[in-house]
């Protein structure tokens, strides 16, 4: 019975970490889109978003017409090691679009 409870606890903790990583990716994409739309330098925007995003996530910016799109993608691996190493990582991704701000 105890091994089942431990496995269930590990699975729930992993599920929680995946959810939190997704929320961080959404926040990072939103912040990157806003900052880029305000005209901040791409390197600064990507650096700021990288600090918000989950570890190892990739941040990209794309300008099209009068909008900027920020994308954050990454993955969350299983907790611990040993037998859990054979479990595939879960991909996370987020995207935010903002209108480029100009002079009023």
Image (spheres, rainbow, N blue to C red):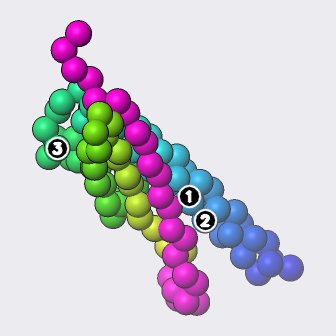
Residue 100 locus on image (x, y percent)? 28, 29
- Above/below status of 93 relative to 35: below
Q: Residues within 10 Å of mark 3 (few under 14, many from 20)?
A: some
Can residue 101 be seen from the camera position used here?
yes
Q: CA distance from mark 3 to mark 1?
A: 29 Å
Q: CA distance from mark 2 to mark 1?
A: 5 Å
Q: Residues within 10 Å of mark 2 (few under 14, many from 20)?
A: some
For the C terminus, the image quarter is: top left
Residue 90 locus on image (x, y percent)? 54, 70
Contact, mark 2 vs mark 1 (Cβ under 8 Å)? yes
Query: Residue at position x 69%, y 63% from top?
Result: 12
Secondary element at tag 1: helix
Front one among 55 and 33: 33
Q: Residue tagged by mark 2?
A: 14
Front one among 82 and 90: 90
Secondary element at tag 2: helix
Q: Is residue 55 magenta?
A: no
Q: Residue tagged by mark 1?
A: 17
Residue 21 lies left or right of residue 69; in this view the side is: right
Contact, mark 3 vs mark 1 (Cβ under 8 Å)? no
Query: Residue at position x 26%, y 23% from top?
Result: 101
Mark 3 or 1, which is nearer the eye? 3
Q: Quadrant of residue 55?
A: bottom left
Q: Residues within 10 Å of mark 1 (few under 14, many from 20)?
A: some
Q: Residue tagged by mark 3?
A: 42
Q: Which residues are magenta?
A: 79-104
Secondary element at tag 3: helix
Residue reaching furthest right? 1
Q: CA distance from mark 2 to mark 3?
A: 33 Å
């Amino acid at each position: 019975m105890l091994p089942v409870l431990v496995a269930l606890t590990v699975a729930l903790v992993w599920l929680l970490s995946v959810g939190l990583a997704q929320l961080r990716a959404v926040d990072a994409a939103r912040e990157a889109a806003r900052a880029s739309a305000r005209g901040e330098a791409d390197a600064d925007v990507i650096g700021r978003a990288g600090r918000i995003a989950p570890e190892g996530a990739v941040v990209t910016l794309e300008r099209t017409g009068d909008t900027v799109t920020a994308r954050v993608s990454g993955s969350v691996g299983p907790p611990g090691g040993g037998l859990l190493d054979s479990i595939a990582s879960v991909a996370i991704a987020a995207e935010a679009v903002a209108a480029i701000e100009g002079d009023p």
